[in-house]
Image (spheres, rainbow, N blue to C red):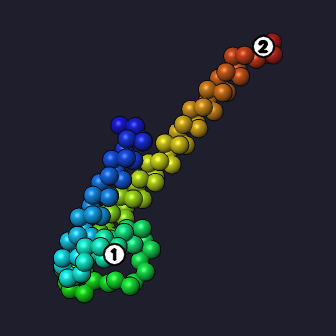
Amino acid sequence: MNHHKAAAATIAAAAALNLAFGTAFAAADHISVGNGLYFAITTATTVGYGDITPRGWLAHLLAVAMMLTVVPLFAATFSLFTSGLTAGHVRRAEQAIKDHVTATPGTRG
């Protein structure tokens, strides 16, 4: 699987988990689904304004699970994108060097 496909799969998994955790958090904390998703997004992006906080033990458990799964998945996505970009630059640089070496007349003698 190439870097872009892996990154897309990782971000899709993170988004799906974030949606599921946000909805479950809303039910556990007896708040609206919109507020639950808002909490999930601010937690996943590590912004965490603190205006919505878990109140019950189940909400705390869901928040911890969200932090231990969704946050690393988003971080992995950025890592995959970065390594894919880097690998592309390295391949182009290697090809440019090979092209230069083969196009340059022999100066060794």
Relative placement, left or right, of 14 versus 107 is: left
Helix, strand or loop for disc 2: loop
> Which of the two residues, 77 or 38, is positioned nearer the viewer here?
38
Question: In the image, which disc is placed on residue 53?
Answer: none
Which of marks 1 and 2 precedes in the sequence? 1
Q: Is residue 20 visible?
A: yes
Residue at position x 54%, y 37% in the image: 88
Q: Is residue 83 above or below residue 15?
A: above
Name the residue rendered at 46%, 54% in the picture: 78
Q: CA distance from mark 2 to mark 1?
A: 64 Å
Q: Which residue is mark 1?
A: 39
Left or right: residue 43 versus residue 107 is: left
Q: Where is residue 20 shown, x and y percent of the image?
A: 23, 64
Taking the spot 40% from the left edge, 37% from the top edge, the residue there is 2
Location of residue 57 in the rendering, given as x and y in whole percent from the top left corner:
19, 84
Q: Position of residue 48 (x, y in %)?
A: 41, 77
Q: Residue furthest bottom?
A: 55
Residue highlighted by disc 2? 105
